[in-house]
């Protein structure tokens, strides 16, 4: 991959740099460490932010402002008459081809435009390719690395190791492999519920077939495999009746029998309209007998519903409704993303808390989970339970009066809305008892009507009519059972495929997680000796050995393998601020060799702010002698920005060395022009003339004094 080094930077009208009509210019050497010193408020940070704006399109410092502070209005220099910012980068490719010049302009209306005066085909794309995790590093980067939670640190550090894509994919696989997501997303839960309902219907239908078979043939099938024989036995029984035999020759299957034709034969033998009415009554009698016969003891099922509803009421009382749940879900997402790592501060209002926010969110969501599980149990009992199914069955009977309202529908609705109560269950039980009484009364009345009407018709023909109607009921029951069988086979096949896919995804997620962890461990092991060596040279604590630990997930801990004879101690707990930040920068500089972006340079802005005096100089020496481009084949072009007076003396001392280039910013921004002190004399003369024209004699005086003192 072609790397790009920064040869020159020009800025006008951006942040603290005005330089209207005469852009600030600073040059960098490709094969040296480049240091830039500036007193506080002299434009050093504006250089860092200008490079950041070019390659990322934003300034992170402004991103921390409130909207009321109008951060976008602070990109352009406030004193530039055109309110327009322009930045030019001159990049040198590592393949020796000609330099690339890219101009980034932010207009007074806030539009950002990018172009290349040297004709690069995709200047914006080139800038994006420079935006790696190591291109721009400041003190805040390392402080955040130390201060963050282990989870937030791990997620931040994954891209530095080139593992962000793997971590993202692992999280995605874990999400997909979650049983709840698989069941809901692939429809497996619905299929299981459907199959459970099919099994219940098959069981009920088998009982009905058995009852009819026993009445018609005297034989009850012992298991479902004997259902195919039931039809043949019923046809055989009907063939024994001489009146019906002509209509049953040749011997048909039960499904082929034309019941209406058999009824017509019987009706002709009996004569009269009374027989038609008798047919209607016997059909109703058979149906009602079937409903009555399917009644089972449902009291145990009702008690299960009562217990489940009671548990649901208790669990729901500990929650505050769906809107609150959505709020806590969002909080859980924010905390899990690593965007918020203030454990005892509210992410919504910023107030300090007396408890750990992550645990609080987890506890609340656990209450909602318990409520959801209780709701699911109630819903399942209202679908599968014999008590509820009995209510449904009776309400579907036209002879039952429901007084215009459905108990089953009301219970379902209340359960879905989490408003179902034990009192509602008790009321539903009363209605069920009323339904059962109605069924019993209606069946007895129908039987009496059949008996009364049948007395006017030969008894044998009356019984024969009943038998034919029962044969029809058996035929329909067998056909229904066969339909359920076919549907069960089809849905079982679908579920088997989904279960196979589920097993595959879970195995894949588990294996990928293991491989990703192994890869992370190998990568971290690969930089371990480097960051330990850098740390040892910077802080000079021979018996203090740092170590990073990845816990098998995304969390990244910072520890000390050795600490003055002790083992496995928390680095954050015992190291000084200087040593902690030295740990962080050592890790970053060691990991920088793994970078995959196209930037060949690293810009460090005041990274030693918290360092002890000696540690500052040691870090500079490590960069100069071991990490820079000419010292290491895999090294970088370093650009150091600092306002530290002690480092200024160090920079001045190295300014004439072959591996170091140093310049000092002079001027009085944001009003007066800014320049680099080591620019040629003609440049200073032009600046003087420009300052005199503006009447900025005071800033010129300061500039000249600073320039003279730096020589």
Image (tube, grey):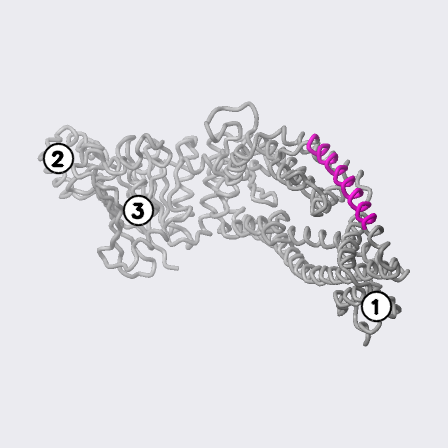
Judge the density around disc 3: few (<14), some (14-19), many (≥20) Cα neighbours within 10 Å.
many
Picture quadrant where residue 14 is located: top left
Closer to the observer: label 3 or label 1? 1
The answer to which of marks 2 and 3 sits earlier in the sequence is 3
> Which quadrant is home to the N terminus?
bottom left
> Is 38 above or below relative to 352?
below
Work out how far the residue at label 2 is from the one at label 3, CA to CA, in angstroms: 28 Å
| SS at circle 1 | helix
Answer whether residue 430 is magenta in the image.
Answer: yes
Return the x and y of residue 573 as percentages of the image width and height: 55, 30
Q: Give the range drawn in magenta.
A: 423-449
> Is 63 above or below relative to 161?
above
Work out how far the residue at label 2 is from the one at label 1, CA to CA, in angstroms: 116 Å
Q: Mark 1 points at which residue?
A: 235
* Farthest residue, direction right: 218
Work out how far the residue at label 3 is from the one at label 1, CA to CA, in angstroms: 89 Å
Q: Mark 3 points at which residue?
A: 54
Main SS class of the magenta portion in the image? helix
Q: How many labels does the image show?
A: 3
- The answer to whether marks 2 and 3 mark residues whose Cβ atoms lie closer than 8 Å is no
Return the x and y of residue 28 as percentages of the image width and height: 28, 47
Q: Mark 2 points at which residue?
A: 691
Please give the name of the residue rendered at 38% of the width and 51% of the height, measured from the top-left corner.
Answer: 629
> Is 100 above or below relative to 426?
below
In the image, is 610 to the left or to the right of 706? right
């Amino acid at each position: 991959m072609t790397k790009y080094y920064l040869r020159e930077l020009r800025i006008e009208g951006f942040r603290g740099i005005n330089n209207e009509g005469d852009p600030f210019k600073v040059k960098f050497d490709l094969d040296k460490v480049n240091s830039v010193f500036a007193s506080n408020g002299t434009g050093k940070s504006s250089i860092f932010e200008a490079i950041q704006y070019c390659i990322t399109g934003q300034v992170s410092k402004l991103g921390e402002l409130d909207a009321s502070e109008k951060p976008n209005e602070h990109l352009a220099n406030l004193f530039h008459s055109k309110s327009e910012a322009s930045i030019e980068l001159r990049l040198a490719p590592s393949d020796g081809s000609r330099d690339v010049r890219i101009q980034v302009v932010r207009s007074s209306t806030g539009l950002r435009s990018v172009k290349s005066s040297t004709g690069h085909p995709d200047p914006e794309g080139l800038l994006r390719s420079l935006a790696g995790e190591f291109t721009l590093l400041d003190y805040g980067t390392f402080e955040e690395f130390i201060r963050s939670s282990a989870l937030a640190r791990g997620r931040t550090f994954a891209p530095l190791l080139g593992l962000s894509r793997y971590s993202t994919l692992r999280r995605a696989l874990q999400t997909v492999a979650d049983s709840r997501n698989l069941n809901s997303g692939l429809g497996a839960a619905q299929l299981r519920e459907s199959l459970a309902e099919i099994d219940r219907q098959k069981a009920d239908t088998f009982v009905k077939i058995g009852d009819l078979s026993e009445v018609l043939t005297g034989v009850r099938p012992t298991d479902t495999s004997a259902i195919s024989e039931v039809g043949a036995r019923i046809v055989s029984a009907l063939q024994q009746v001489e009146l019906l035999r002509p209509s049953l020759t040749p011997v048909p299957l039960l499904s082929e029998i034309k019941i209406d034709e058999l009824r017509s034969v019987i009706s002709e033998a009996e004569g009269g309209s009374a027989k038609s009415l008798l047919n209607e009554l016997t059909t109703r009698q058979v149906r009602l007998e079937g409903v009555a016969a399917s009644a089972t003891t449902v009291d145990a099922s009702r008690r299960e519903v009562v217990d489940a509803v009671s548990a649901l009421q208790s669990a729901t009382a500990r929650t505050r409704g769906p809107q609150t749940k959505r709020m806590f879900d969002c909080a859980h997402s924010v905390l899990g993303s690593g965007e918020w790592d203030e454990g005892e501060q509210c992410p919504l209002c910023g107030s300090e808390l007396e408890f750990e926010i992550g645990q609080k969110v987890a506890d609340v969501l656990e209450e909602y989970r318990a409520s959801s599980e209780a709701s699911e149990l109630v819903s399942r009992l209202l679908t599968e339970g014999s008590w509820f199914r009995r209510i449904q069955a009776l309400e579907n009977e036209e002879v039952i009066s429901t007084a215009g309202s459905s108990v089953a529908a009301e219970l379902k609705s209340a359960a879905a809305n989490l408003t179902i109560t034990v009192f509602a269950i008790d009321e539903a039980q009363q209605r069920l008892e009323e339904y059962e009484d109605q069924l019993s009364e209606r069946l007895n009345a129908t039987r009496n009507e059949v008996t009364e009407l049948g007395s006017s018709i030969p008894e044998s023909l009356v019984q024969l009519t009943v038998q034919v109607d029962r044969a029809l009921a058996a035929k329909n029951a067998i056909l229904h059972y066969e339909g359920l069988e076919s549907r069960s086979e089809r849905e079982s096949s679908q579920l088997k495929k989904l279960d196979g896919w589920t097993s595959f995804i879970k195995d894949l997620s588990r294996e990928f997680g293991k491989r990703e962890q192994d890869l992370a461990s190998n990568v971290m092991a690969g930089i371990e000796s480097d960051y330990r060596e850098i740390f040892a040279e910077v802080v000079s604590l021979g018996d203090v050995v740092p170590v990073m630990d990845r816990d098998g997930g995304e969390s990244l801990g910072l520890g000390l393998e050795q600490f003055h004879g002790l083992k496995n101690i928390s680095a954050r707990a015992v190291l000084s601020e200087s040593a902690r930040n030295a740990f962080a920068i050592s890790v970053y500089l060691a990991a920088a060799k793994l970078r995959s972006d196209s930037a060949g340079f690293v810009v460090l802005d005041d990274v030693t702010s918290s360092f002890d005096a000696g540690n500052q100089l040691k870090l500079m020496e490590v960069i100069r002698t071991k990490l820079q481009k000419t010292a290491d084949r895999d090294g970088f072009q370093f650009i150091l920005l600092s306002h530290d007076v002690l480092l200024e003396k160090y920079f001045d001392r190295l300014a004439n060395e072959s591996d170091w280039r140093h310049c000092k910013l002079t001027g009085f921004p944001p009003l007066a022009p800014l320049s680099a002190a080591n620019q040629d004399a003609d440049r200073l003369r032009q600046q003087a003339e420009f300052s005199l024209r503006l009447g900025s004699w005071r800033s010129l005086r300061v500039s000249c004094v600073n320039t003279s003192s730096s020589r």
